[in-house]
Image (cartoon, rainbow, N blue to C red):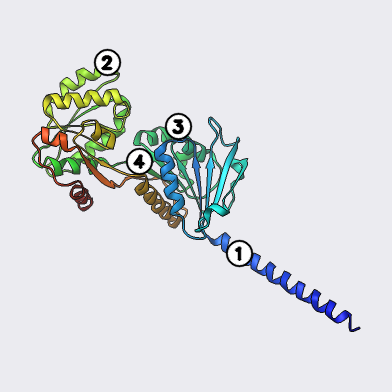
Amino acid sequence: MKPLIPLLLQRLHRGTRAALALLFGLAQLGANASASGLTVLMGDDLAAHSEFVQHLRTGQEPGGRFELVRLSPGGGAETSQITETAAAEPDRGANAGVRTRSLRAAPVDASLTMAVGVPAARAALERPGQQPLVLAMLSRLDYENLRASSPALRRGDRRVGVLLRDPAMADQLALVAAVLPQKYRIGVVATPESEPLVRELQRAAQGGNPPWDVQVEYAPDATSLAAALRSVVPRSDALMVLPDLIGDSQAATLSVLRAGAGAGLPVFGASEGLVRSGGLAAAVSTPAQLAQQARLLGQKLASAGNTGGGPLVESATPAAVRVNATVARGLGLRLPEERELAERLTVTR
C-alpha cells in the first residue's frame, strides 16, 4: 500500500492541474467572447487606405480582436481571402497569424465590421450578417452610386454607417468665410454626375449669414471645361473644386487653377494636393482622424439597437487647414495661421 500512496498523490496533483487549466481556459474564452472585436475588409492598396487601417489597428482596445480581411483582386464574397488576425496587445506581432479561408466564414463574435474603400464596401454589403457595418473612406459620389446599385444598402434592415472621406460643404464654406470675410460669390464647375455635391453645396450656402451666392456651370466633358470656366469666372469672388471627376483629374484641376490665377481669384478645395498645385486653402482630413471618427461612428451604431431607417452618414471632420502662402501673397491676402483657421472651423461647427 505504501508505494501506491505517492502514485495516487501524483495523479491527484495532475488532475488538479488539468482542472485548473480547464477553468482558466474557459475563463479566457469568456473574456475573449466579451471583448470588442473589429473585422476590417480591405480591397485595395491605396496609401491613404493602408494608413487608415494601421491607425485602426493601433487604436484597438487592449484585449480586443482585430481581424484584417484582404480581398483578392476582382474577388467576390465567395472567393478565398488572405486573413490576418492580431490581438490588440503590446506583444501584437508575436500573436499575429495569417491564414486563408472563405470570406463567408467570418467569426460570429465580431462586434463591428468596417469596409475600407469602394470594393470592400460592395463585398461587405453582399456579406451575410447582422453586425453593425461601417463603410469608410468613400467619397460622396461613391456613396450615392452604392446606394443606387446596392439593395442591401437601401433595405435598412442592418445598422449601417457611412463615413465620407471629405469634409462637409458647410465646413468648406466656413473656411472660405474665414479667409475672405467680405466675399459671397462662389463659382463651381461641375459634371452632371456631381449633382449630389452641388445640392449639398447649395443647401450649405443657404445656411450662410448672409447666404452665399453659388454660381454653377456644368461641363459634360473635358472639351467643355474651358467654356464653363469662361462663363463662371466673371461671376465669382472665388472658385471651389469639388471632389468629383474634375477634382479627381489632375489636368482638369490645373485648368481651374490656371483660370483662377488668370483672373486673380483664389481657389479652394478639400485636398492638400490642390493647395500644393496652386490652390489658396483647403480643409482636409487625415487618415488618423478618419480612423478615430470611424470608431466613434461604429460605437454609435452599436448603441443604437435594431433601429430601422437608412444609413447613418457622416462627413469627415476637418483635422487641419492647409494654406499656400505663396498664392496668398500673390493675391495680396494676409491670412491667419493654419492652426487658427482650423480652430475657427471647430468653433463654427
Q: Residue at x 20, y 17 (%)?
A: 227
- Identify the image quadrant of residue 210: top left
Disc 4 marks which residue? 165
Under circle 3, the secondary element is helix
Under circle 4, the secondary element is strand
Disc 3 marks which residue? 149
Instruction: Specify the label residue 211 is tagged with.
Output: none
- Identify the image quadrant of residue 250: top left
Q: Is residue 31 left or right of residue 192?
A: right
Disc 2 marks which residue? 223
Q: How far apart, in angstroms, are the residues tagged by discs 1 and 3?
A: 43 Å
- Nearest to N terminus: mark 4 or mark 3: 3
Look at the image and tell me whether residue 114 can be seen. Answer: yes
- Nearest to N terminus: mark 2 or mark 1: 1
At which x and y percent is residue 192? 30, 25
Q: Name the residue type under label 1.
A: Gln
Q: How far apart, in angstroms, are the residues tagged by discs 4 and 3?
A: 20 Å
Q: How far apart, in angstroms, are the residues tagged by discs 2 and 1?
A: 65 Å
Crowding near pointer 3: few (<14 within 10 Å), some, many (20+)? few
Between label 2 and label 3, give the one nearer the viewer. 2
Between label 4 and label 3, give the one nearer the viewer. 4
Quadrant in which the N terminus is drawn: bottom right
- Nearest to N terminus: mark 2 or mark 4: 4
Between label 1 and label 4, give the one nearer the viewer. 1
Look at the image and tell me whether residue 217 can be seen. Answer: no
Q: Name the residue type under label 2.
A: Thr
Under circle 2, the secondary element is helix
